[in-house]
């Protein structure tokens, strides 16, 4: 009971027919609704990945500012330390919701 040429050709002829019938059943309004849902999901994923990238960059920037503040503290640069700490705090406030 293997796959004969007759069975293969029958399957290949019925498959497109079933597919096209299914497409014909769906109305234009349903297609536009489906396209809207797909576009909505894609937009959500794009925004999510963009937000993740922005958050990573903010974390890097905050880490750099904190490192600069630590180095400036070692060299007794109090004015620079205060400025960098203020900048780091401002970065943290912007990144938290």
Image: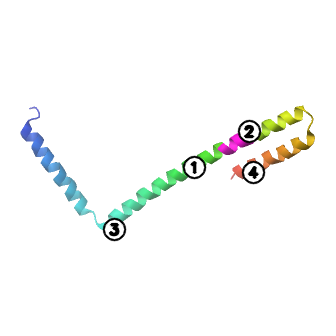
- Secondary element type, mark 4: helix
Is 35 left, or right, of 87 in this rendering? left
Q: Residues within 10 Å of mark 3 (few under 14, many from 20)?
A: few
Pick whichever of labels 4 and 2 is earlier in the sequence: 2
Q: Picture coordinates of residue 21 (x, y %)?
A: 20, 58
Give how far apart the Cα atoms at labels 4 and 2 are. Answer: 14 Å
C-alpha gap between disc 1 and disc 3: 31 Å
Check the image and name the residue furthest to the bottom: 29
Q: Is residue 91 above or below residue 22?
A: above
Crowding around mark 2 (Cα neighbors within 10 Å: few <14, some 14 to 19, many 20+) is few
Q: Mark 1: which secondary structure? A: helix
Counting from the top left corner in percent of width and height, residue 53 is at: 60, 45
**Between discs 4 and 3, the one toward the N terminus:** 3
Q: Position of residue 14 (x, y in %)?
A: 14, 50
| Magenta segment boundaries in residue numbering | 57-62
Residue located at (12% from left, 40% from top): 8
Mark 3 lies on residue: 29
Name the residue tied to disc 4: 93
Q: Is residue 32 above or below residue 47?
A: below
Q: Secondary structure at mark 3?
A: helix
Separation of marks 1 and 2 at Cα, in angstroms: 20 Å
| Quarter residue 9 falls in | top left
Task: Please indicate whether residue 45 sits to the left or right of residue 53 in the image.
Answer: left
Q: Earlier in the sequence, mark 1 or mark 4?
A: 1
Tags 1 and 2 in contact by the CB under 8 Å rule?
no
Q: Which residue is disc 2 drawn over? A: 63
Instruction: Please give the name of the residue rendered at 83% of the width and 44% of the height, measured from the top-left corner.
Output: 84
The mark that comes first in sequence, 1 or 3, is 3
* Mark 4 vs mark 2: in front: 2
Q: Which mark is residue 50?
A: 1
| Marks 4 & 2, CB-CB < 8 Å contact | no
């Amino acid at each position: 009971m293997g796959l004969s040429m007759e069975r293969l050709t029958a399957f290949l002829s019925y498959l497109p027919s079933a597919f096209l019938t299914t497409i014909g059943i769906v109305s234009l309004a349903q297609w536009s609704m489906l396209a809207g849902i797909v576009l909505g999901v894609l937009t959500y994923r794009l925004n999510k990945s963009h937000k993740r990238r922005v958050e990573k960059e903010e974390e890097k920037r905050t880490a750099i500012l904190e490192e600069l503040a630590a180095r400036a503290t070692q060299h007794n640069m109090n004015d620079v330390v205060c400025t960098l700490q203020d900048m780091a705090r401002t970065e943290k406030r912007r990144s938290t919701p």
